[in-house]
Amino acid sequence: MLNPVTAVVLSVFTMAGFLSSGAACAAEAVEFDTTFLQIDSQRVDVARLGRGNIVSPGVYTVDISINDNHVARESVRFTAAHEGENARACLTRKMLEAYGVDFTKLASTGDQVTDTCVDVSASVPDATVEFDFNEQKLNITIPQKYMRNLARGYVAPELWDNGVNAGFLSYNANAYRTASGGTQASQEYLGLNAGVNIGAWHFRHQSSVTAGTGQSIQLDNIATYVQHDVTKLRSQVTLGDAQTTGDVFDSIAFRGAQIATDDRMLPESLRGYAPVVRGTADSNARVTVRQNGQVIYETNVSPGPFEINDLYATGYGGNLDITVTEADGRTKRFTVPYAAVAQSLRPGSTRFAFTAGQLRDESLQTKPGFTQFTVQRGLTNLVTLYGGAIASNGYVAANLGAAFNTKYGALASDLTTARTQLPGAGSQQGQSLHIGYSKFIDATNTNVALGAYRYSDSGYLGLADAARLRDAALHGSDVNAADRERGRLQLTVNQTLKDRGAVFANVSSQHYWNRPGRDMFYQLGYSNGFKYGTYCVTAGRTRSADGTLSNEVMLSTSIPLGHTQHSPMLSTNLNAGKGASSMQTSLGGAAGERNQYSYNVYDTVGQASSGGVNASAGASGTWRAPVAQVTASASGGAHSAQVSAGVSGSVVAHPGGVTFSQTVGDTFGIVEAKGAEGATVSSASGVKVDSRGYAVVPFLTAYGMNTVDIDPKGSSSDVEFVSTSERVAPRLGSVAMLKFKTNTGRAALVRAPRMDGEALPFGAEVVDGSGRQVGVVAQDSRIFARGVEETGTLTVKWGESPEQQCSVRYSLPAKGAAMHTAFASVESHCVGKLAVAGATSAGNDVASVN
């Protein structure tokens, strides 16, 4: 019998040889002392395990990672120095430079030719190269000091995936029924979002259909356009209906052409504004960056000047405290001011947009054409310049401004000059001054944001206002009917009180040239938590231009009813203002293994200004199914009732066929996992692989590396995943195809002792009729084989001679037959190779299914 120690040792190296890939390309052959593996008089030939799984010379398409960061997926040539040895990846200098290796920091490699194989381990100190054959992954480790400095989250444009040719139709259908005072009404809505991708061009169309009681059917064309990347300019070209960027001038809808910078093409660590941190180290030092007392970045630097330019943007900022810790323990500290407004850019960054087209405004009878250009440039940590110009029928405007980052806060100011020609009414000219300010006060944790707009005189008009006035003048309407804004003020203050909650205040004001008075709004609030939940108190006052006052006070609380994942939340909202008040209590939560169900029930009691009391109650629910999202709601009161239902989802056509899914975003993915029906996509709630082996991942992040995982739970045990994780960096608007390799075939547990009852050698190799390894022998002659046919012959080998081999003939029960396990369990015998001819009937011995 096999002693326990031998069993453990043998099972470890046997399963390692069977399941792993012989990962290292440079792995040396290993010899096992079979004395420890002797089973009675039998010995298992383990020479086959000495070199793992040999990598044969050839070209393999592999995923390449540098220091655990995925950098490429491409075909790599593998070569072997001598016949029978493991082949190694042929990595050229050109390839390694593309992956980020900086050869200027290395001694001469001896060969500067870019298309010859480089011995990475010999050329780069402490570098390693390992190849995982099963996963087809090439893992390269390079010390950081020999790598080029790349921003965190950087994904090379060469890895941006154009996706596959595909089309989709997303729909959102809702139906409402109301009854009030004996009168019934209904309304139906259908929103459509369609797209077609051909190569790198993306066509999009949005429209809606609305119908209701007493109304005619209304069809609205919201937008129709095509889009394409311009990688070198880090921008998007859009042709059709779209919106201008709104970075310098107010955003407007247009029909025409636009090319505009897309910050999503930058690594996340370079988006938005954050200052560059510069300093000098005397030795190999550690640099720590703190903001508001928290460490937000830490890195090691070499002696000499250093620069950190990939800090993540953190909203309105807060000064950065820098600590440089030298190798001998000495420290140096300094502060970098950090405050940002919307116009602020990092040093060296540029944004631009050029638009030419027609103003899209359905209220206009005559829609003018226009051309607009804007540009922003970050000069230093302290200064960003920006400006632009607009030219249209009877209208021109120019803008120039600057944003400053100082220790007293961030300030942006710009001046816009505009001239408008009104048909039959001469011309108007005026200026608009804009001032914006933002400051986070570290000492008090106070955040202040101020946006002030003041129009110097009544002659200033923005493009949209000018178009409406010109349209009115062209068609004989009153040019003074529309409000013409004179000034606008917005102030926001947020004050955290550490463990005592937070206070916020909002103030806004607007006044106009062509009507008296001023619209004012004030709001003050306080929020905090208590032992059982959270609460918030808000008070607001609105004063319209005619002097009418309206006050409102609101108290809200949220209390979780339990501590489990699906514990419901109890919420209460109390409103009081202008002679009326109401109180609403609701109970809501989620259910299901993946939170695919959500629900909410509520009741409301209110007192109107007339003194009457109204009460109502209602419920709503949502089900996020694999192929759609379904919603329903109902409510009722003393004099009214309402019911509604809705369904939303998408239909996606792709090279593999047509797949129904939840509503997709502009950038999404298709999972292909043949035979894996029922497997779930971990990164998308409620998404499962359908009967044809496809699933839709509704949302992917454009230009960033997305990891999509599959959970085999729910799929057939007859399917084995070669890999359960794939990565992709899709371009904006693309439909990425993620192919998960699977091995399909029956799974079976076969007990097959030899004809004389003697047990099979533990750890012996088991292959099918085509010579493919399907398992190993476990204790008591049991074989767990995966990927086998319905009927066939398995060969058990514990050596190369015929005396060290035997055959098992089997026949699995039909699928659907009653089984107590997820795999078939059969009894048979293993017949020696020399005895097969005379023992055919015995070899066919297959007992009943367990």
Image: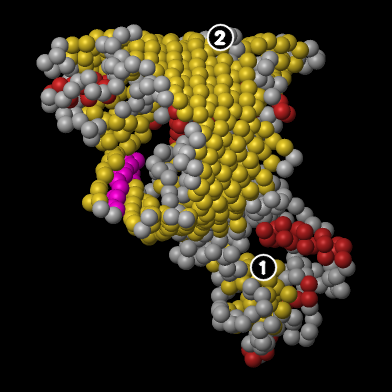
Q: Which of the marked residues, 1 or 2, is nearer the chain's N terminus?
A: 2
Q: Residue at x 87, y 62 (%)?
A: 5
Give the class, few, some or many, for how many residues have Cα within 10 Å of label 2's Cα (few <14, many ≥20). some
Indicate the amino acid at tag 1.
Gly
Q: Is residue 248 above or below residue 661?
A: above
SS of the residue under disc 1:
strand
Residue 198 in view: no
The picture places residue 704, in percent across and down from the top left corner, at 50, 37
Q: Residue at x 74, y 85 (%)?
A: 755
The answer to which image quadrant residue 39 occupies is bottom right
The answer to which image quadrant residue 364 occupies is top left
The mark found on residue 729 in the picture is: none
The mark found on residue 406 in the picture is: 2
The picture places residue 424, in percent across and down from the top left corner, at 11, 16
The answer to which image quadrant residue 419 occupies is top left
Q: Please give the range of residues in magenta.
A: 195-212
Considering the image in quadrants, where does the N terminus appear?
bottom right
Q: Nearer the viewer, mark 1 or mark 2?
A: 2
Disc 1 marks which residue?
A: 775
Residue 334 relative to residue 387: left or right:
right
Q: Residue at x 47, y 24 (%)?
A: 521
The picture places residue 49, in percent across and down from the top left corner, at 71, 58
Q: Residue at x 78, y 72 (%)?
A: 779
The picture places residue 106, in percent across and down from the top left corner, at 62, 23
